[in-house]
Amino acid sequence: MTDLSVLLALTSAFLFALSIQVQSLGLEHIDFRSGTLVNIGTTTLIYWVVSPLFVDSGYWFAQATILFGLVGLFRPALSLNLAVAGVKYLGPTLTSGLAATAPVFAAFFAIALLDEKMTFSIAAGTVGIVAGIFVMATRESKGQPRGWPLWAMFLPLGAAFFRSIAYPVTMIGYKEIPDPFFAALISYSVSLMVALALFKIQRRKLAKFSWGYSWFALAGVINGISIYSLNTALKFGQVLTIAPIVACSPLFTLIIG
């Protein structure tokens, strides 16, 4: 793994942590479903505005486009909804801490789908990072009862699971189209359609306009850069090494918080 992929993975981790905190501010004003829709919509809009500068017209008819679209079915449509719901019930620090278990799921998919090799050093590093962050995020202060339901832990864990699937599927698509921007453009476009469909099926309405929309729009900008950094890191590295680095985001969440 190159130094560039390490730097990009760390950048993605920091931006993801920053996005979690920004969305936490937005949740003080609007519900998480409206906020998530604005988040995904903002990122998608930005990608489409700048797409003429980066996208090759020949990409649209490639098989890899279908794979990138498949990623969009669960990231960020499902993963972001679960993550933002986790912030609502658990707070940003605990949510990002539990979401840091993604490398465990990612390791399984990387070995099964990409035939990557698990070395002792990678395994030890992954277990150490995940265990340390999990303990740090879930420990309770003495004399203070837990203020959240146990079932809420499955929200960020679900987000971690769906994010981890995106890693190998994106890398398989890179074999035909090694373009991080195009991969993000397609996945976010599909996710926006999924999010809009769910919003309509559930017969929900956007919350009244407030500053909450601004926070989620800002989070959408941050997420767009974060995903691009992550996709670029995957282009130059391996899932087994990139995923644990991205999982360090809770450390940044604690510092920012």
Image (cartoon, grey):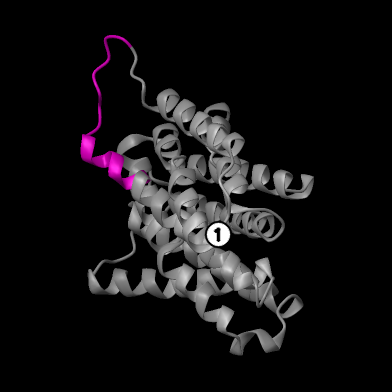
The local secondary structure at tag 1 comes to loop
**Residue in the picture at 51% in, 43% down:** 22
Q: Is residue 21 left or right of residue 176?
A: left
Image x and y of residue 214, in percent: 51, 53
Query: Is residue 119 positioned above or below 51 on the image?
Result: above
Residue located 65% across and 47% down the image: 9
Residue located at (27% from left, 15% from top): 144
The residue beneath circle 1 is 115
* Residue 82 visible in the displayed image: yes
Q: Is residue 219 left or right of residue 6?
A: left
- Count the labels in the image: 1
Dot 1, how many residues are within 10 Å of its Cα: few (below 14), some (14-19), or many (20+)?
few
**Extent of the magenta region:** 142-156
Residue 138's image quarter?
A: top left
Single out the residue that lies furthest toward the top.
Answer: 143
Picture coordinates of residue 227 (x, y %)? 59, 57
Query: Residue 94, located in which quarter of the rendered image?
Result: top left
